[in-house]
Amino acid sequence: GNSVTQMEGPVTLSEEAFLTINCTYTATGYPSLFWYVQYPGEGLQLLLKATKADDKGSNKGFEATYRKETTSFHLEKGSVQVSDSAVYFCALRREGYGGSQGNLIFGKGTKLSVKP
Amino acid sequence: DAGVIQSPRHEVTEMGQEVTLRCKPISGHNSLFWYRQTMMRGLELLIYFNNNVPIDDSGMPEDRFSAKMPNASFSTLKIQPSEPRDSAVYFCASSLGQTSYEQYFGPGTRLTVT
């Protein structure tokens, strides 16, 4: 089946540290991949996405590269800030499929805490 | 622009009571999704609508759960009777289309059933 696995948290870092949150997926076909962020008390927001192999999504200093050979989409940021503290969700969407088969499938989320 | 609006933001109720969660999607969006988030199971899709019609409700846990979308600007998720295991955060999201468009999430309703 289709699924997303991401590293369990929580992840605690000091400000300006390097961040990696691992995400791997299993899917048939050619999925699009996403990272969503959920700040405390809020709903999920799209952070970045990549729609085909070797694409790099980037936003707000975060990056993730779609690696088909390793079925991965790891999230990275070179220097985290306290304001990056949130829960991060990796997700996939099977393209070319309608109805429920084309819906988003989320990982369980990774909580990031950044200390000053 | 107003985003997805959900009410109430917090709901505490006793087991056996009826609970109704409400959602107003972004104007112009024609797809609406209800999700449930728990620590154990993560984020689960319960049901989604396209043009006010339920397309897939296979994620609805049992008959105690029901959802309606009487018009393009309003949807409800009802639990009757509620049970402690229904305690979770319920999110509503909307998008321009069923699958190929970005989903915009509301702030969620935190439900506690005692």
Image (spheres, coloured by chain):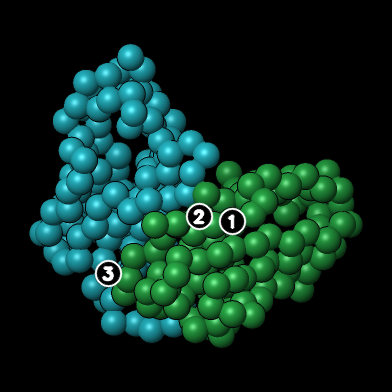
Chain colours: A cyan, B green
- Residue type pointed to by label 1: Gln
Task: Compare residues B102 and A63 and report the one nearer the observer.
Answer: B102
Q: Is residue B51 above or below residue B11?
A: below
The residue furthest front is: B1
Residue B31 seen in the figure: yes
Residue ID for mark 2? B106
- The answer as to whether the residues below labels 1 and 2 share one chain is yes
Query: Going 50% across and 55% down the picture, which residue do you hit?
Result: B106
Q: Label 1 marks which chain's residue? A: B
Q: Residues within 10 Å of mark 2 (few under 14, many from 20)?
A: many
* CA–CA distance in space, label 3 to label 1: 30 Å
Which residue carries the number 3 mark? A31
Image coordinates of residue B38 in percent, x first then y, are 60, 48
In space, the residues marked 3 and 2 are separated at their CA atoms by 25 Å
Kind of residue at disc 3: Pro
Residue sitting at x 50%, y 66%: B25
Question: How many neighbours does mark 1 have within 10 angstroms: few (below 14), some (14-19), or many (20 or more)?
Answer: many
Answer yes or no: are tags 3 and 2 on the same subunit. Answer: no
The first of marks 1 and 2 along the sequence is 1
Q: CB under 8 Å between callouts 1 and 2? A: yes
Q: Nearer the viewer, residue B107 or A109?
A: B107
Corner quadrant of residue B36? bottom right
> What's the chain of the residue with tag 3?
A
Q: Determine which residue is flagged by label 1.
A: B6
Residue A70 appears in the figure: no
Q: Quadrant of the C terminus of chain B?
A: top right
**Circle number at residue B74:** none
Q: Is residue B62 above or below residue A63?
A: below
Would you say the residues marked 3 and 1 are in contact, meaning their CB atoms lie under 8 Å apart? Answer: no
**Secondary element type, mark 2:** loop
Q: Identity of the amino acid at label 2?
A: Gly
